[in-house]
Amino acid sequence: QVQLVESGGGLVQAGGSLRLSCAASGSIFSINSMGWYRQAPGNQRAFVASIIGGGRTDYADSVKGRFIISRDNAKNTVYLQMNSLKPEDTAVYYCTMRVMTGLRVADYWGQGTQVTVSS
């Protein structure tokens, strides 16, 4: 079993910054990819950013140049540095990881952390 625990959400004024963290624990052999999604009220969950084992990153157009995703493989942790935050960034942010445990590969999700950006 694998658990993902997020932290770092909160309330911030527009233009401010927040750093989200997501740590995985459990029977982990390796982690192929890590990413962040977000879901605003009334909207579907949407892709924010991802990072694969080789370090290649990908971002949604709406956050390019403002958000930075990084990972610490030794800690099985992914980070999302969010700068120049806007009210439209307000959402519940979820981390996800594609984890190999033994012979099985599966996607796991965190419980979500609320980010609120005030204008």
Image (spheres, grey):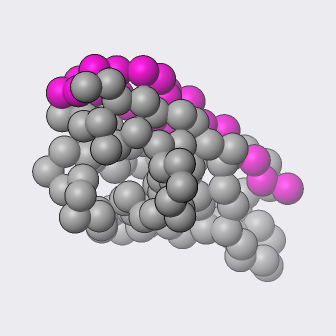
Q: From the viewer's perspective, is 52 left or right of 22?
A: left
Q: Nearer the viewer, residue 99 or 64?
A: 64
- The answer to whether residue 72 is seen in the rendering is no
Q: Nearer the viewer, residue 18 or 21?
A: 18
Q: Where residue 33 sits: x, y (%)?
A: 50, 66
81 with respect to 104 (left or right): left
Question: Taken as a whole, is the magenta stretch helix, strand or loop?
Answer: strand
Seen in the picture, residue 32 relative to 37 is either above or below; the reply is: below
Farthest residue in the right direction? Answer: 1
Q: Nearer the viewer, residue 38 or 36?
A: 38
Query: Which one is nearer the viewer's eye here, 29 or 70?
Result: 70
Residue depicted at x 34% and y 43%:
89
User: Within the magenta stretch, is there residue 85?
Assistant: no
Give the total number of marks visible in the rendering.
0
Can I make out residue 37 in this image? yes
Q: What's the residue at 27%, 47% (across, down)?
A: 68
Q: Position of residue 41 (x, y in %)?
A: 53, 48
Q: Quadrant of residue 17?
A: top left
Residue depicted at x 42% and y 21%:
11
Q: Which residues are magenta?
A: 1-23
Does 101 appear above or below 40?
below
Question: What residue is shown at x 24% (from left), y 37% (from top)?
Answer: 86
What quarter of the picture does the N terminus occupy?
Answer: bottom right
